[in-house]
């Protein structure tokens, strides 16, 4: 038996060493039961679609904002963008916009909004909402990097963000027409607009942009999409119904019920969910026993990697992690190949740089960091690593496979002679990763819109990462070129150079990419058969979905 097999045996035998409570056993307790005595609305004449959010902590007190993560299906059905991309996330169809024109130099876009658009409360949705949303997201704190990367190139963005201007100079609205002027081309500017959710200015304009994600608005949000929120029962469920204000083709499904479950298989067996997605190996395996659900695998660019905290919140260097040889030792000291094969069979692929070796011809030669504990020990010795120090190893995923992975990693590091303290974060990941930062190594995931997100984390302007890496701007030119370039040959050359810089510095420790699955109860639900990256906005042709 391989050593990893022994490690996993240890993992499963001594999970109590982890400083967090394991998830409840669904065989002993109904993990789909609402957390209070309220009753989830029953299906109405077969016209109800049951969705779930997989969260062992239960249903929250609000609908999650969309500027950090575009959100689940219910959020995409509530809030729209200027464009609605195809499943490839690139080819665009009109949504809130009716049309657009771009200049030959890629520096000016003219976008015409549809007439008669409404918010769910009946107020007009105008070009001013778009301008205000783009201005506000540039000052918000919880934001997906694809938006700041693209919108920071709008003329006057630096002055606007710094508070040296009372408006964002490069974006204006006149009637139904929006004009955007850029300082430099942004290769994916329009696809990014296909992801960016427009918020209602009339309801959020007085909120502090730094705290807009915490606004009371999200307890009863007013959207602009095909469906509106009917009822939110905190801790229990939310229901959504078709919005009268929606000007597009009306949906066939008359109600959507969203509940929270710790794991989806029990919900699938008891008819409490009709459609969901997951990339959790244990759920994918358990769903094989549910006959009425059909699995639809999809290939996506979803990264798992280690963030290495090289500075504290005061800017002091973390001596445990600052020497690159220590970080290299971690890569050689963990048998990533065996771990992924054991824990994510057929689902994950080992990663060496931000370009997966099996995913794109842009991958360049890079160390494969094959498992070599003796080399790892030698590197630690060369780096004068202090083995009396304790390595704080942290993660935020609550599924059992992730817990097993992190416990096995801790065992590998222990075998190198390190003292390891492994714990699950107790607060939300964003706060723990970027504000509290009480860790040496943290497991992180990234559902990437493109390579710009992975490499954008190395930019010296990345407000979240700069305090972790102590970034010195060495990636800035390459990332800027990548963002501007559309030509495939040029992008390949740029990506190869970025990978060389990545290997030379090893700021992030790449682990693996993992695919995802959609599950459909095809005995009850008929979809349009279009399945893409579940963390991004794309046209699923939901108006064609129906309950059989």
Image (tube, helix red, strand yellow):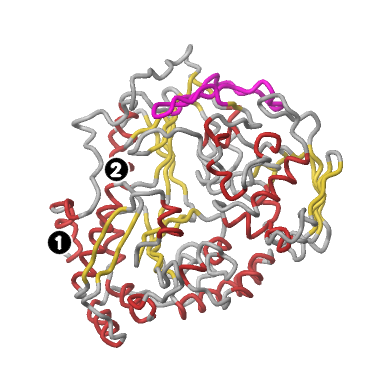
* SS at mark 1 in the image: helix
| Residue at the extreme bottom | 382
Q: Nearer the viewer, residue 12 or 178?
A: 178
| Residue 515 in the figure: left or right of residue 487 | left
Q: Which mark is residue 418?
A: none
| Residue 480 in the figure: left or right of residue 174 | left
Residue stretch rendered in magenta on the structure: 229-258
| Residue 110 in the figure: left or right of residue 207 | right
Q: Is residue 256 magenta?
A: yes
Q: Position of residue 219 (x, y in %)?
A: 52, 31
Residue 538, image quadrant: top right
* SS at mark 2 in the image: helix
Q: Position of residue 80 (x, y in %)?
A: 65, 37
Q: Nearer the viewer, residue 250 or 14?
A: 14
Q: Residue at coordinates 81% horizontally, 64% vertically from top-left?
A: 105
Q: Which mark is residue 285?
A: 2
Residue 234 against residue 111 in the figure, above or below: above
Residue 435, image quadrant: bottom left
Residue 198 against residue 472 in the figure, above or below: above
Q: Nearer the viewer, residue 509 or 160?
A: 160
The residue carrying mark 1 is 6
Q: Position of residue 20 (x, y in %)?
A: 25, 49
Q: Position of residue 378 (x, y in %)?
A: 26, 85
| Residue 359 in the figure: left or right of residue 338 | right
* CB under 8 Å between discs 1 and 2: no
Q: Quadrant of the N terminus?
A: bottom left
Label 1 to label 2, Cα distance in Å?
A: 21 Å
Q: Nearer the viewer, residue 296 or 230?
A: 230
Of labels 1 and 2, the one closer to you: 1
């Amino acid at each position: 038996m391989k050593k990893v097999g022994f490690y996993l045996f240890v993992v499963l035998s001594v999970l109590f060493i982890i400083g967090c409570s394991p998830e409840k056993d669904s065989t002993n307790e109904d993990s789909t039961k609402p957390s209070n005595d309220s009753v989830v609305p029953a299906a109405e004449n077969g016209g109800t679609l049951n969705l779930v959010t997989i969260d062992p902590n239960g249903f929250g007190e609000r609908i999650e904002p969309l500027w950090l993560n575009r959100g689940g299906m219910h959020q995409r059905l509530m809030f729209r963008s200027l464009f609605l991309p195809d499943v490839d996330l690139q080819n665009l169809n009109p949504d809130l916009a009716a049309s657009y024109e771009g200049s030959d130099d890629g520096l000016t876009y003219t976008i015409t909004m549809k007439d008669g658009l409404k918010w769910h409360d009946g107020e007009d949705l105008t070009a001013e909402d778009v301008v205000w949303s783009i201005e506000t997201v540039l000052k918000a704190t919880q934001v997906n990097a694809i938006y700041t990367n693209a919108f920071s190139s709008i003329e006057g963005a630096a002055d606007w963000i710094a508070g040296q201007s009372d408006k964002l100079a490069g974006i204006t609205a006149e009637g139904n027409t929006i004009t955007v002027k850029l300082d430099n081309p942004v290769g994916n500017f329009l696809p990014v607009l296909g992801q960016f959710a427009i918020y209602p200015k009339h309801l959020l304009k007085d909120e502090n942009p730094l705290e807009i994600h915490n606004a009371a608005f999200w307890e009863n949000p007013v959207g602009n999409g095909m469906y509106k929120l009917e009822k939110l029962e905190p801790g229990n469920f939310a229901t959504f119904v078709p919005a009268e204000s929606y000007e597009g083709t009306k949906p066939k499904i008359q109600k959507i019920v969203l509940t929270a479950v710790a794991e989806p298989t029990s919900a699938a067996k008891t008819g409490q969910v009709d459609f969901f997605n997951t990339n959790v190996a244990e759920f994918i395996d358990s769903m094989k026993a549910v006959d009425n659900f059909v699995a639809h695998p999809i290939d996506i660019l979803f990264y798992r990697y280690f963030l290495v905290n090289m500075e504290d919140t005061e800017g002091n260097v973390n001596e445990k992690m600052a020497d690159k040889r220590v970080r290299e030792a971690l890569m050689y000291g963990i048998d990533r190949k065996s771990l992924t094969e054991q824990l994510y069979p057929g689902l994950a692929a080992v990663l060496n740089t931000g370009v997966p070796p099996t995913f794109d011809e842009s991958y360049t030669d890079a160390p494969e960091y094959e498992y070599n504990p003796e080399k790892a020990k030698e590197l630690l010795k060369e780096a004068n690593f202090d083995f009396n120090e304790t390595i704080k190893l942290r993660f935020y995923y609550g599924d059992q496979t992730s817990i097993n992975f992190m416990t096995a990693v801790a065992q590998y590091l222990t075998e190198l002679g390190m003292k390891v303290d492994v714990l699950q974060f107790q607060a939300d990941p964003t706060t723990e990763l970027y504000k509290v930062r009480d860790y040496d190594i943290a497991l992180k995931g990234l559902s990437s819109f493109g390579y710009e997100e992975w490499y954008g984390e190395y930019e010296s302007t990345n407000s979240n990462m700069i305090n972790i890496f102590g970034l010195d701007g060495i990636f800035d030119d390459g990332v800027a070129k990548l963002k501007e370039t559309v030509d495939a040959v040029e992008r390949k050359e740029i990506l190869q150079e970025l990978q060389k810089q990545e290997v030379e510095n090893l700021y992030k420790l790449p682990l693996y990419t993992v695919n995802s699955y959609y599950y459909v109860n095809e005995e009850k639900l008929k979809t349009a058969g279009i399945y893409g990256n579940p963390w991004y906005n794309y046209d699923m042709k939901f108006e064609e979905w129906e309950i059989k």
